Image: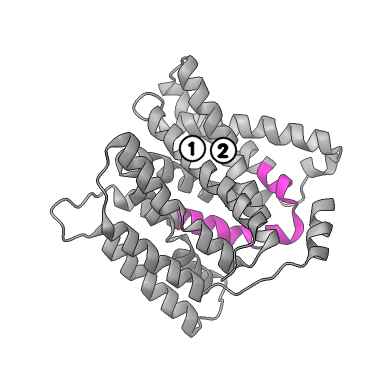
Amino acid sequence: MIFPMNTVLWMMGTLASFSLMAIAARELSGTIGTFQILFFRSLLGLVIISLLILAKKDLSLFSTSRLKQHITRNLTHFGGQYGWFLGLSLLPLATVFALEFTVPLWTAIIAAIFLKERITLKKVSAILLGLMAVAIIVNPGNELFDYSSFIVLAAAIFYALAYVSSKSLTNTEHPMTMLFYMCLIQLPMGLAFTILNWHTPNLIQWGWLLLVGITALTAHYCIARAMQLSEVSIVVTLDFLRLPLIALVGIVFYAEDFQISIIVGGALMLLGNLINTPSRLITKKTNKKREST
């Protein structure tokens, strides 16, 4: 498998963004509540996306005829984000990232149930590998088993529900429109759960909150650009590097133990994702067309 340098660079941006967001969330845990973090994430994201749309001079990106679908998508996406950020405060960073990689597993199952998508041998193989990986990572028979793992697994299922509900939206909505309504809809949701337990951030906490808001957008933008430039299988493989990278961050900065089971489980999920991921080459012509929109 050949890794094009431009794709590698965009994926480096993705890995850096997710890792920095995880560090910022960990630094805020215990002082700023999870709902308040999500509120500021949406607020900062809304400001940034709005400025980008205004700079693009295409006000039609602010409008949509599919508000109900956006609301449905973001109810589940908000649940996924809450579980992910909460998990970062309760579990080793590598465990959270490893369990997040189960999203394609749950997406395949949910799509088969609700969208009546055909279950193929490849999908069955991917699902079985994913379930094996979950068992290895969570290790329920271990006396050190942490029930917080189920919070992140629930978050992954909510993310999968959001992805399934996004399927039709991606056919009609511009990515900036989807990001704008994601921030707009989730903003009052975060505020509603925060207002009774509000904590005014200090200067350092403002810095971490700003980092969460920026990296949340750059992570999705970088991986989208990588998807435009290369096969999905290449992007999925490079994205797996998030796991050893965040494990190293946890060991160096938070004295977390290295667990080989997380790497083994993550590798099984990578294999399952690759089996179930069709290669999709994007031509230069398509790239130019997307870049112009």
Magenta residues span: 157-179
Q: What residue type is labelled 1?
A: Leu
Vertical placement of residue 271 versus 169, above or below: below
Crowdedness near tag 1: few (<14), some (14–19) or many (≥20) residues, C-alpha within 10 Å = many
Vertical placement of residue 61 versus 108, above or below: above
Q: Quadrant of residue 224?
A: bottom right
- Residue 113, horizontal then vertical, whole percent: 49, 72
The reply to whether callout 2 and callout 1 are in contact (CB within 8 Å) is yes
Mark 2 residue element: helix
Q: Which residue is drawn at 49% across and 64% down?
A: 104
Reading the image, the residue beneath label 1 is 20
Report the disc number at residue 215: 2
Left or right: residue 179 versus residue 292 is left
* Extreme residue toward the bottom, this view: 121
Q: In which quarter of the image is residue 157?
A: bottom left
- Residue 31, horizontal then vertical, whole percent: 37, 23
Vertical placement of residue 251 versus 46, above or below: below
Q: Residue at x 83, y 39 (%)?
A: 56
